Image: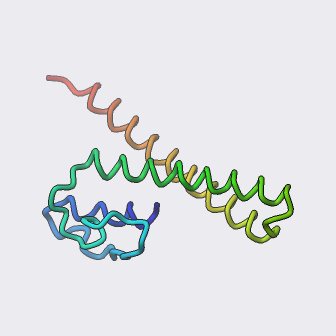
Amino acid sequence: MIESIKGVNSLFSTGALSSVTNDTSSTASPAVAQGTGTGMSFAQVMGDMATEATNSLRLSETKSFEAIQGKATTREVVDAVMNAEQTLQTAIAIRDKVVTAYLEIARMQI
């Protein structure tokens, strides 16, 4: 998910965010990973990030059930839960920023 967030800089036409590196891992969508941004809207990027967050939380839950059944090690469960926690904290931070921006726009005088 963090790789997708780093890929958001392709949505901006200015070079102000050029110092952010794009990590072309398998979790980033192809247009974002390539840095082209062609055909990618902000809504699509946010949708992809939400999907990745949901998948991370599901993986954590699955690993927990596998540990109860004796199919997963404690290390795998801890890694999955920590990844899910980081994903959730990132999603909450993005939500807070969006709400703050919306409230600031709503307070502007016309």
| Residue 5 x, y percent position in the rendering | 38, 60
Which residue occupies 28% across, 65% down? 32
Relative to 51, say whether 33 is above or below.
below
Q: 68 above or below 100?
A: below
Q: Position of residue 8 (x, y in %)?
A: 30, 60
Say which quadrant the C terminus sits in: top left
Residue 22, image quadrant: bottom left
Q: Is residue 13 left or right of residue 100?
A: left
Residue at the location (80% across, 65% down)? Answer: 71
- Colouring used for the render: rainbow
Q: Is residue 107 above or below residue 85?
A: above
User: Residue most toward the top?
Assistant: 110
> Which residue: 77% across, 53% down?
65
Count of numbered circles on the image: 0
Which residue: 36% across, 76% down?
24
Question: Where's residue 52, x and y in %?
Answer: 47, 55
Q: Splitting the image into 4 quarters, where does residue 75 fall?
A: bottom right
Residue 30 is situated, as x and y percent measured from the top left of the image, at 29, 67
| In the displayed structure image, the side of residue 48 where residue 96 appears, left or right | right
Residue nearest the viewer, comparing 4 with 14: 4
